């Protein structure tokens, strides 16, 4: 199996970045404990945006996470008030 990376980049106003970071902190433990194939989750608070990098044991696991209630219902709902634009979502595979 090829390891996969899920990159989610979000435009969030500077004053709201700590709130977006709190959403990350809240959902990191259940992500690592319950999402099949999840290996890591890292937060990058950058000047231009907020980026969350996830690693999985396969592309299928990354795609499944995007369709999961944890992501599609919980995480998205809590981040929505802070988003200035639709997030960019990309999946990469390590060759």
Image (cartoon, rainbow, N blue to C red):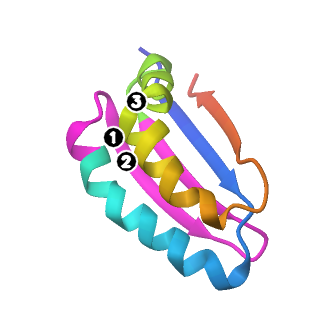
Q: Is residue 72 above or below residue 80?
A: above
The percent position of residue 7, horizontal first and vertical second, equals 61, 44
Q: Is residue 80 above or below residue 64?
A: below
Q: Nearer the viewer, mark 1 or mark 3?
A: 3
The percent position of residue 19, horizontal first and vertical second, equals 52, 76
Left or right: 84 in relation to 67:
right
Residue assigned mark 3: 68
Q: Residues within 10 Å of mark 1 (few under 14, many from 20)?
A: some
Q: CA distance from mark 2 to mark 3?
A: 17 Å
Q: Is residue 61 above or below residue 49?
A: above
Residue 40 lies within the magenta run: yes
> Mark 2 or mark 3, which has the lower sequence index?
2
Q: Residues within 10 Å of mark 2 (few under 14, many from 20)?
A: some
Which residue is found at the position 79% from the left and 55% from the top? Answer: 85
Residue assigned mark 1: 39
Q: Which residues are magenta?
A: 32-55
Asked whether 91 or 35 is in front, the reply is 35
Q: CA distance from mark 1 to mark 3?
A: 16 Å
């Amino acid at each position: 199996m090829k390891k996969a990376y899920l990159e989610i980049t979000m435009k969030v106003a500077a004053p709201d970045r700590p709130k977006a970071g709190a959403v990350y902190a809240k959902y990191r433990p259940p992500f690592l404990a319950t999402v099949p194939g999840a290996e890591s989750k890292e937060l990058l608070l950058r000047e231009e945006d907020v980026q969350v990098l996830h690693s999985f044991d396969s592309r299928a696991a990354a795609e499944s996470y995007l369709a999961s209630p944890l992501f599609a219902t919980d995480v998205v709902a809590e981040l929505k008030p802070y988003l200035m634009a639709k997030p960019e979502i990309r999946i990469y595979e390590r060759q």
